[in-house]
Amino acid sequence: MKLPLIVIFAFAVSINGWIADKFKHSGMTYTNDKYCNVSYSSERSFDSIKNMADVGVNWVAIVVTQYQKKHNTTEIFPLWNAIKSQDGYYDYVTSKDSDLEAIINKAHELGMKVMLKPHIDIIDDPKYWRGDIGEDFSEQNWSEWFDSYGNMMLNYARLSESNKVEMLSMSCELITASEREQEWRSLINKVRSTYNGLITSSANWGWLNATGGEDTKKKWWDAVDIIGIDAYYNVYSDEVENYHHVMKLYEPVVERIKFLHEKFKKPCIFTEIGFCSGDCKRGSTSSEKMQNLQAIWYQGVMESFLPYQEWFYGFYWWNWVTDAAYGGPDDVCLTPQSKPAQQVLRKYYHSVKPPPKRPEYKPICVCTA
Ligand SMILES: *[C@@H]1O[C@H](CO)[C@@H](O)[C@H](O)[C@H]1NC(C)=O
Ligand SMILES: *[C@@H]1O[C@H](CO)[C@@H](O)[C@H](O)[C@H]1NC(C)=O
Ligand SMILES: *[C@@H]1O[C@H](CO)[C@@H](O)[C@H](O)[C@H]1NC(C)=O
Ligand SMILES: *[C@@H]1O[C@H](CO)[C@@H](O)[C@H](O)[C@H]1NC(C)=O
């Protein structure tokens, strides 16, 4: 009787070991609206998300953006009709709930879990960004802003609950607002009374040379289920020759995330992370070297966290867009679509499908960082 037991035990361990190699959140960020005005619910988008699933992605962050006029105004609103940003770079628009529902259902059909990730952008205050919202707010301003923000979040919490969304991000890079601990705790309680899925928050990274960013300063990490960080840490170098170099440069980042995990005893994810395959500027050209550099960074970052899969659940790479023809060898921006980085993902995400095909049709969307 003893021998079979040992055999079963050994077998179970090796199976677990193998499964553990795939990050629990083998994730990707999926974007339309301001980053590519091909709607989530279009055929092109359905082609694109199918390609994403074929790469081995098992969790997808669906981004939806709402807006406020200035960094010191307190009203948040959707834009149902697209307007161009002042620099002409982005299309400011909000995805309709029906489009969100369509893409959430499609992701589920393809076997992926979903994080809904609401963002706020400022449309008419060029010197400021979302991290500054509330910089010179009075108490009255804060209370009005949280009413407006809370309204938006409770609507998305209801939408998430009724569409079985598995995770909701409470905030994205709202560095200044993040300091209002009591308001966030109270909003999380309200959201939890409507929504039963997991809760995270997508904190801004911090400079590694400074005392802290939203990642290490946030006091309410205990109130979420998973610590989420938009991880554009300042360790990038284009001098690296292989992923071992990346791992060396990435050591302080791993230490920082480990510190957060140990302090709050919560699992961690990168709610955003990404590297450009060039200089990230529209109109620039890429090269084989720069395309490979992006892939090396993908590999180095994933290798750095392989030993910590017990508590480091994974990555939501920025970004995969709704245009299935986007990306490729000429693109200098962040997407891994149709690039060597996509091959790296297929490997680490244990893809069992052939590499996705780039469609015959021409891309509509152009490089957005
Ligand atoms: C994208 O937006 C621009 C205007 O901002 C418009 O000309 C174009 O037709 C839009 N494309 C799609 C696919 O909606
Ligand atoms: C809000 O900020 C803008 C600059 O972005 C400034 O011109 C304006 O005076 C500010 N308003 C208040 C009420 O502080
Ligand atoms: C912010 O609060 C100040 C002082 O309470 C007030 O004068 C100002 O109008 C408020 N700003 C907004 C956008 O409500
Ligand atoms: C950290 O480094 C960045 C650039 O790498 C610089 O802009 C910033 O001022 C530095 N911060 C401190 C506190 O030294």
Image (spheres, rainbow, N blue to C red):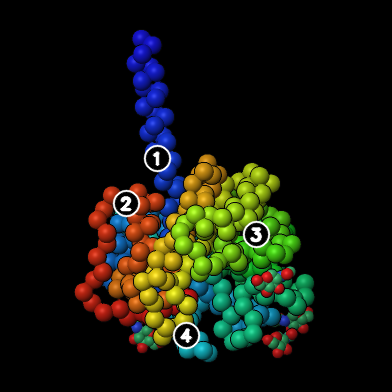
What separation in Å lies between label 3 and label 1 (alpha carbons)? 29 Å
Is residue 42 at least partly visible in the picture?
no
Q: Is residue 159 above or below residue 80?
A: above
Instruction: Tell me which label, 2 or 1, sits earlier in the chain.
Output: 1
Per the rendering, the mark at residue 215 is: 3
Marks 3/2 in contact by CB < 8 Å: the verdict is no
Label 2 is placed on what type of residue?
Answer: Ser
Label 3 is placed on what type of residue?
Answer: Asp
User: Which residue in the structure is indicated by mark 1?
Assistant: 19
Label 1 SS? helix
Foreground of the two, 346 or 78: 346
Side of 343 where 298 appears, left or right: right
Label 2 SS? loop
Q: Is residue 75 above or below residue 11?
A: below
The quadrant of the rendered image in which ligand 3 is seen is bottom right
User: Which residue in the structure is indicated by mark 4?
Assistant: 89
Residue drawn at x 60%, y 83% as measured from the top left: 69
Instruction: Tell me which label, 3 or 4, sits earlier in the chain.
Output: 4
What separation in Å lies between label 3 and label 2 (alpha carbons)? 31 Å
Q: Which quadrant of the figure has residue 191?
A: bottom right
Task: Single out the residue that lies furthest toward the top.
Answer: 1
What separation in Å lies between label 3 and label 4 (alpha carbons)? 28 Å
Is residue 152 at least partly visible in the picture?
yes
Label 1 is placed on what type of residue?
Answer: Ile
Per the rendering, the mark at residue 351 is: 2
What separation in Å lies between label 1 and label 4 (alpha carbons)? 42 Å
Residue drawn at x 52%, y 58% as measured from the top left: 245
Marks 3/4 in contact by CB < 8 Å: the verdict is no
Mark 2 crowdedness (10 Å alpha carbons): few <14, some 14-19, many ≥20: some
What separation in Å lies between label 2 and label 1 (alpha carbons)? 13 Å
x then y, percent, for residue 206:
65, 64
